[in-house]
Amino acid sequence: MTYVITQPCIDVKDKSCVDVCPVSCIYLEGDDVDRKLYIHPDECIECGACEPECPVSAIFHESAAPDEWHEFIELDARWCRGDDAEKNAVRARVNEIQPPA
């Protein structure tokens, strides 16, 4: 089990969650590349420090993720564990979920 960053983070990327994470498990390759932040499921220690810091309530423990955002559990894991091709596939799916403005 881990925490996950869901759809409300897309195009917001506030990063206040990054500042409070004691194990630095929240990633963003670059503001011009990724539209959301990702939590690495193998590095997250489930401390919950990130959740209250999110200004758009995008962070959930995976067991509490709303059904409509459950796919983000898999997307975060794929992005964090994948190679460049896998990261690009996740980025494409994020664009399908919420097309760029």
Image (tube, rainbow, N blue to C red):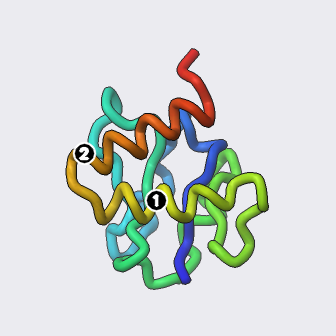
Residue 32: quadrant of the picture: top left
Tell me if 34 is positioned left or right of 17 in this view. Answer: left
Circle 2 Cα neighbour tier, 10 Å, few/some/many (<14 / 14–19 / ≥20) = few
Q: Secondary structure at mark 1?
A: helix
Comparing 11 with 92, the one in front is 92
Which residue is most to the top?
101
Residue 99: quadrant of the picture: top right
Circle 1 Cα neighbour tier, 10 Å, few/some/many (<14 / 14–19 / ≥20) = many
Reply above or below: 10 against 80. above
Comparing 48 with 6, the one in front is 6
Task: Identify residue type, mark 1.
Answer: Asp
**Residue 46 coordinates in the image, percent (x, y):** 52, 82
Tell me if 19 is positioned left or right of 6 in this view. Answer: left
Q: Are marks 2 and 1 in contact (CB under 8 Å)?
A: no
Q: Quadrant of the C terminus?
A: top right
Comparing 68 with 16, the one in front is 68
**Residue 70 coordinates in the image, percent (x, y):** 67, 61
Mark toward the start of the polypeptide (2 vs 1): 1
Residue beneath label 1, please?
76
Residue beneath label 2, please?
85
Residue at image location 32% in from the left, 32% down from the top: 33
The mark total stands at 2
Q: Secondary structure at mark 2?
A: helix
Task: Identify residue type, mark 2.
Answer: Ala
Tell me if 82 is positioned left or right of 34 in this view. Answer: left
Residue at image location 41% in from the left, 58% down from the top: 18
Q: Nearer the viewer, mark 2 or mark 1?
A: 2
Q: Gap between marks 2 and 1, in whole Å?
A: 14 Å
Residue at image location 58% in from the left, 43% down from the top: 9
